[in-house]
Image (tube, grey):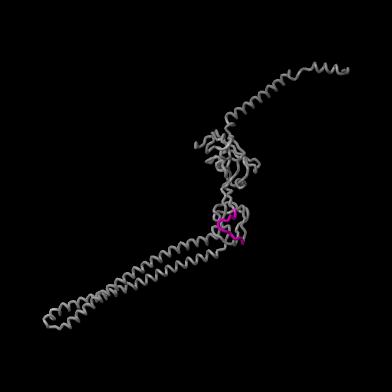
C-alpha cells in the first residue's frame, strides 16, 4: 500500500519528458552510433585490405651461429686468457696449452731434415770424387788398349820371322803371352771404368732416397710446427665467451669442448610459422618483431630465407605417418628473419630470447 506522499511524485515523474525526446540527446546518440559504425567499418576495411595478410607467430626465438672452442692438440692447460662473458675479437688468444712435447717433436723432425741434407752433401762429395776415379779408370783403359795393340802388333810382326827361322819360337811365345796379358789388362780396365760409372749412379740413387726422406721429414716439421702453433687456441670469430668450462692445470684431449664464442653482433631470428601461413610469404618481405626481454619493444626485419623442410623432417626421430592411424597435424616451417637494429640495441639481443614475429605478406618480395 503506497504512502500518500508517493502519489504526487509519481505523477511528477510520469509528467517528466523522456531524455530521448530531447534533440541534443538524439543527435549525440546518432553521432555515437555513427562513430561506432565507422570504427567497425574501418576495422573491417583494415582487416580485409591489410590485417588478414599479416602472418604472426609467437613460436620464434633469437639465434646465433655460435662456435664451440676445442683444442687440436692435447696437453695440460697452462693458462686461460679470457673470462666468462668477455667480448673477444677474431684471432684473439683464448687458452694456452703446454708446448714442451710438440716442441720436442718439432726439434726431432728438424733434425731428420738436417740429417737428410747432410747425406745429400756427402753423396755429392762422393760423386765428385768418383768422377775423378772415372777419369783415372778411363786413362788406364786407354793405356791398356795401347799396350794391347802394341803387343798384338809385335805378334803379327814376329810371327812370319819365326816361320822362316829368323826368330826363335820361344820369343814368339813370349810375345803372344804379352799380348794376352795386355788384352786381359785392357778388359780389367774396362770393367773398372764401368764399375766407377755405376758407382756414380748408385750415389745419385742415394741422393734421391735422401731427398725423399727430407720431404717426409719436412712434412713432419710442418705438422709439428702446426702443433706448436695450436697450443695457443684462438677465437675463430668475434663474439662473447659463454659456457666456459676449461681451467688452468686441466688435461685436455683433442676435441674437448672448452667454451663457446657467441657472435651476439650477428643475432638473427628464426620464426616457426604454420604451413597454412606461408601461401603468400616471400623472401624480402618486411617483418615486425617484438622482443619480450625488451618490454615488447618493436623492431624491424626482413624475411631472409626458408628452411628446406619442416621442423619434423630434421627431428632426431622423424614421424612416420605411414604407420597406424593418421591424424593430420599442421606442420611448422622455420623462417629466418634478418634483424635491422643499431649496434647498441644488438648488444641487448641474446640468443634464445622469445620473440613475437609478424610478416607483411601483402608487401612485394622475391618470388623464390
Left or right: 18 in relation to 39 = right
Q: Nearer the viewer, residue 190 or 275?
A: 190
Q: Quadrant of the N terminus?
A: top right
What predominant SS class does the magenta segment belong to? loop
Left or right: 315 in relation to 205 = right
Q: Is residue 286 visible?
A: no
Q: From the top left corner, tell me how far across and down residue 64 is, in percent.
A: 57, 47
Q: Nearer the viewer, residue 186 or 324?
A: 324
Left or right: 276 in relation to 1 = left
Highlighted range, magenta: 249-259
User: Residue at 86% across / 18% down in the picture?
Assistant: 6
- Above or below: residue 290 compared with residue 199: above
Q: From the top left corner, tell me how far across and down residue 67 is, in percent.
A: 56, 51
Left or right: 78 in relation to 203 = right
- Above or below: residue 146 compared with residue 110: below
Q: Is residue 252 visible?
A: yes
Q: Quadrant of residue 248?
A: bottom right
Q: Nearer the viewer, residue 276 or 61?
A: 276
Amino acid at each position: 500500500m503506497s504512502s500518500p506522499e508517493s502519489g504526487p511524485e509519481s505523477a511528477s515523474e510520469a509528467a517528466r519528458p523522456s531524455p530521448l525526446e530531447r534533440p541534443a540527446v538524439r543527435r549525440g546518440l546518432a553521432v555515437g552510433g555513427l562513430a561506432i559504425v565507422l570504427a567497425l567499418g574501418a576495422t573491417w576495411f583494415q582487416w580485409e585490405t591489410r590485417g588478414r595478410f599479416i602472418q604472426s607467430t609467437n613460436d620464434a626465438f633469437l639465434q646465433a651461429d655460435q662456435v664451440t672452442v676445442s683444442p687440436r692438440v692435447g696437453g695440460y692447460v697452462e693458462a686461460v686468457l679470457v673470462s666468462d662473458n668477455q667480448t673477444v675479437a677474431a684471432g684473439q688468444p683464448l687458452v694456452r696449452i703446454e708446448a714442451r712435447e710438440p716442441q720436442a717433436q718439432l726439434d726431432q723432425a728438424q733434425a731428420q731434415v738436417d740429417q737428410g741434407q747432410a747425406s745429400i752433401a756427402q753423396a755429392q762429395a762422393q760423386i765428385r770424387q768418383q768422377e775423378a776415379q772415372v777419369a783415372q779408370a778411363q786413362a788406364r783403359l786407354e793405356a791398356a788398349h795401347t799396350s794391347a795393340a802394341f803387343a798384338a802388333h809385335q805378334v803379327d810382326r814376329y810371327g812370319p820371322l819365326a816361320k822362316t827361322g829368323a826368330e826363335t819360337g820361344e820369343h814368339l811365345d813370349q810375345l803372344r803371352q804379352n799380348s794376352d796379358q795386355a788384352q786381359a789388362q785392357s778388359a780389367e780396365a774396362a770393367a773398372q771404368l764401368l764399375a766407377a760409372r755405376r758407382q756414380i749412379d748408385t750415389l745419385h740413387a742415394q741422393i734421391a732416397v735422401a731427398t725423399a726422406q727430407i720431404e717426409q721429414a719436412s712434412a713432419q716439421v710442418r705438422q709439428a710446427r702446426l702443433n706448436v702453433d695450436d697450443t695457443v687456441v684462438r677465437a675463430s670469430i668475434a663474439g662473447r665467451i659463454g659456457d666456459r668450462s676449461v681451467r688452468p692445470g686441466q688435461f685436455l684431449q683433442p676435441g674437448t669442448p672448452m667454451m663457446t664464442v657467441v657472435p651476439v653482433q650477428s643475432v638473427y631470428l628464426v620464426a616457426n610459422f604454420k604451413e597454412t601461413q606461408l601461401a603468400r610469404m616471400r623472401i624480402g618481405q618486411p617483418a615486425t618483431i617484438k622482443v619480450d626481454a625488451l618490454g615488447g619493444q618493436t623492431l624491424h626485419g626482413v624475411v631472409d630465407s626458408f628452411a628446406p623442410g619442416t621442423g619434423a623432417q630434421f627431428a632426431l626421430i622423424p614421424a612416420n605417418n605411414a604407420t597406424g592411424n593418421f591424424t593430420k597435424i599442421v606442420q611448422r616451417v622455420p623462417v629466418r628473419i634478418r634483424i635491422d637494429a643499431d649496434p647498441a640495441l644488438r648488444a641487448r639481443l641474446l640468443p634464445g630470447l622469445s620473440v613475437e614475429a609478424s610478416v607483411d605478406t601483402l608487401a612485394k618480395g622475391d618470388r623464390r
